[in-house]
Image: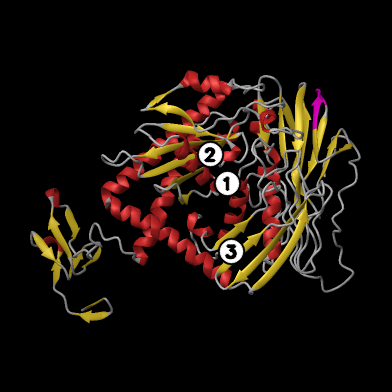
Amino acid sequence: PVFLDGVRQLVPVHAQEELPAELHGPAMILAATGTLVLEPGFVLRRGPEGILVLTDERPVARAAPRGDTSVDPVRLQVFHHRFMAIAEQMGSVLERTAMSTNIRDRLDFSCAIFDARGALIANAPHIPVHLGAMSESVAAVCAAHPAMAPGDVFATNDPAGGGSHLPDITVVTPVHVGEDPAPAYFVACRGHHADVGGITPGSMPPFSTSLVEEGVVLRALRIVAQGELHVEALRAALAGGPYPARRPDENIADLRAQVAANRLGERLLRELVEQEGRAVVDAYMAHVQDDAEASVAEAIARIPDGEHHFEDALDDGTPVRVCARVSGQRLSLDFAGTGPARANNLNAPRAVTRAAVMYVLRALVSREVPLNAGCVRAVELSLPPGCLLDPPAESAVAGGNVETSQRVVDVLLGALGRVAASQGTMNNLTLGDEHFGYYETIGGGAGASALHPGAPGVHTHMTNSRITDAELLEARYPVRVRTFGLRAGSGGAGRQRGGDGLVREFEFLAPLHVSLLSERRTRAPFGLAGGHPGARGANWLNARPMDGKFAVRVGPGDVLRIETPGGGGYGALDCADVDVNDGAASTAPRGAGEGP
């Protein structure tokens, strides 16, 4: 007797040397080296040279019929992952084929798929500030090109058309299915190009006052027509304007990689339609959005009804204010009282503000749900026209994408009482000369929450890129990394402590233009529920304190030290004699090159 499915059964027993040509389970086979149990539904057959071939012939559970568009919980999860897998595979192609350090090594890119209306369906877990804004870029391309042929590909970085800032170039590919002349879907990827022109190398000028000073603008430019890349037209576009791109060959190489990533996404979507049928794919694109909407609505319902106010400010004093009104499963976000658009570059395009909102809503959901258009259906967003978060066209926006977006996230999480402020900046460093530009963002401390301390030395919220390895940076550029480590004690105190920031110190080996665009140098990351603020960031050039935003020329032997902010703490301390951080920045280093 044997136990099968928990039931004691009598089964026939066979010696291995006396097996019939075909044996159906259940059965037991005695061999010289052990015992084989043949379960019901399995068939054992003799193969050539005495090989035993085991075949599973159990009846397969009936799958949902092809064309069944009704939502099934199991298939919903399958499609969640199939859609996301397409975006992830696009990202793998882009990482492997890009030329620039920024895309290939720092992974400053995002890939996603969209439905026929341009609504975000699924994305790989790349850069949040990209993902929430790309649907507006798809919509802008559709508006500019109502007729799209198979094989067409478009590029855009226009902030008024869903762009985040000019270095982020989005490549959009329509996906045609069958004989339908209209696109059935779209795939897109956004990559941060190391240089697209502008008044400083790296295209992240700290003091730009207009969009044209930040580089060339590509407005829904058709770069591939029916499968053929228009290299000369692309080169002309990159050379346009008063401040052209410094390395157009690198731009074109990275754009080729983006086109290749989209081609894979296009092929995989077509294969999915061939396997499941277009009606089923379309239906489940709607179902995954409905699922995200329901998940966010459930998360909103756990927030107490009423108005939740919060305010913070940029280092220049510009307020970012929000009133979050919760009513059941609905949320209204009103940014009335936020400061007007600035004459500097801290203006955040509306698409970037929307991306920050989408990120926060997704972060409220505890279970795994892809970031998609359904996340914002339960939310009403109100932005005062012409404010910092919805600036006029042609406003400078280089810093709004990377700095102001972080402040939007902090005030939203503060209003909802969830997380203390994280470092609130991306610490944007650019260096280069007339021939090249290099760009990196530097992590810092994450804010603490009621249940967890903040993580130390990480990219937070709207950024999710790597930092370039010191060995790689030194091999490719005239710079030496002297120090890179945690900034001990910079996290805010509290029942849960904020994460510590980082220290990164460079020695330059050649004459270069160097610029830094950073925040939280005068206003510390706030604590929450009685927690203490994190330490402000600090910048030093040859042991001389520098502002949060600067552009300088450096020479061989000059040393730049960047100390990034710590995260805010959460919860009041139980005793008064605990060492706390009051948000103060560090004092000057004792020497130009000393470590932390």
Please give the count of numbered marks on the rendered protein.
3
Q: Nearer the viewer, residue 257 or 140?
A: 140
Residue at 80% across, 23% down: 556
Q: CA distance from mark 1 to mark 3?
A: 18 Å
Residue 595 lies, in percent from the top left, at 82, 41
Q: CA distance from mark 2 to mark 1?
A: 9 Å
Q: Nearer the viewer, residue 55 or 553?
A: 553
Which residue corresponds to mark 1?
Answer: 127
* Helix, strand or loop status at disc 3: helix
Q: Is residue 438 left or right of residue 69?
A: right
Q: Earlier in the sequence, mark 2 or mark 3?
A: 2
Residue at 19% across, 58% down: 54
- Visible residue check, residue 106: no
Mark 2 near mark 3, Cβ–Cβ under 8 Å? Answer: no
Task: Give the answer, above or below, for where 358 lies relative to 181.
Answer: below
* Amino acid type for the residue under numbered disc 1: Ile
Which residue corresponds to mark 2?
Answer: 190
Residue 496 lies, in percent from the top left, at 74, 66
Residue at the far bottom in the pictured view: 8
* Amino acid type for the residue under numbered disc 2: Arg
Question: Which residues are drawn in magenta?
Answer: 551-557
Q: Is residue 462 left or right of residue 145?
A: right
Residue at 46% across, 32% down: 154
Tag in front: 2 or 1: 2
Quadrant where the image shows the C terminus: top right
Residue at the far front in the pictured view: 385
Which quadrant of the structure image shows residue 15?
Answer: bottom left
**Is the residue marked by circle 2 packed among few (<14), some (14-19), or many (20+) residues within 10 Å?**
many
The disc placed on residue 364 is 3
Q: Is residue 262 left or right of residue 390?
A: left
* Helix, strand or loop status at disc 2: strand
Q: Earlier in the sequence, mark 2 or mark 1?
A: 1
